[in-house]
Image: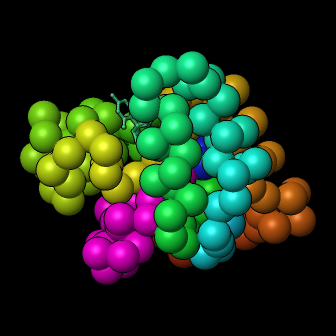
Amino acid sequence: MERTFIMLKPDAVQRGLIGAIIARFEGKGCKLVGMKLIQVDRTLAEQHYAEHRGKSFFEPTVAYIMSSPVVAMVWEGKNVVAIARELMGSTNPAVANPGSIRGSYGMDISRNVIHGSDSVASAEREIGLYFSPEQLLSYTKAGEDWLSE
Ligand code: CDP
Ligand code: MG
């Protein structure tokens, strides 16, 4: 089953949005298989955003995710990488669909509430940065038989 890495960024934690955002994933039908509240250090932040090194927003974005605790999560489900990106909405909350998480809870691209992997390959890389294999749980969730045929 596919897995994706999701981070509730410092603004989401500080603004008291953890529960509301997790409810979007639970309500959709995604299964939570790993979660922790952590303070990201510079080494991890730079690895997380390695693909953006050299861009103007690299340093501010690294500083942003180091600035306060974040919630790191792994969610599982059929096509969950693409589904999570749809739930999140576009990178810039100012233009994201107002029904999406970024569209609901953000105002500006520099504080866009949530990170989610953009491909299955990115998900594998990002999950490996934040979680060891034994921190990810496999279990049967009530109701999962009712999500697809
Ligand atoms: O997070 P997402 O994959 O949607 O966007 P990205 O293009 O991979 O950019 C990574 C992160 O850098 C964004 O989520 C923003 O936090 C930040 N960013 C920014 O502050 N200003 C930009 N012009 C582009 C990205
Ligand atoms: Mg990205």
Decide: is 64 above or below 62. Answer: below
The answer to whether residue 148 of the structure is visible from this angle is: no
From the viewer's side, name the closer residue of 71 and 19: 71
Magenta includes 61? no
Decide: is 127 above or below 118. Answer: below
Q: Quadrant of residue 141?
A: bottom right
138 horizontally vs 118: left or right? right
Residue at 52% x, 38% y is 59
Residue 31: x, y in percent? 55, 61
Residue at 61% x, 75% y is 37
Q: Main secondary structure of the magenta part?
A: helix
Give the colouring mode of the picture: rainbow
As drawn, the residue found furthest toward the top would be 54
Residue at 60% x, 35% y is 49
69 horizontally vs 50: left or right? left
Residue at 43% x, 31% y is 57
Magenta includes 11? yes
The answer to whether residue 66 of the structure is visible from this angle is: yes
Q: Which residues are magenta?
A: 6-28
From the viewer's side, name the closer residue of 126 and 45: 45
Residue 51: x, y in percent? 62, 23
Residue 106: x, y in percent? 20, 54
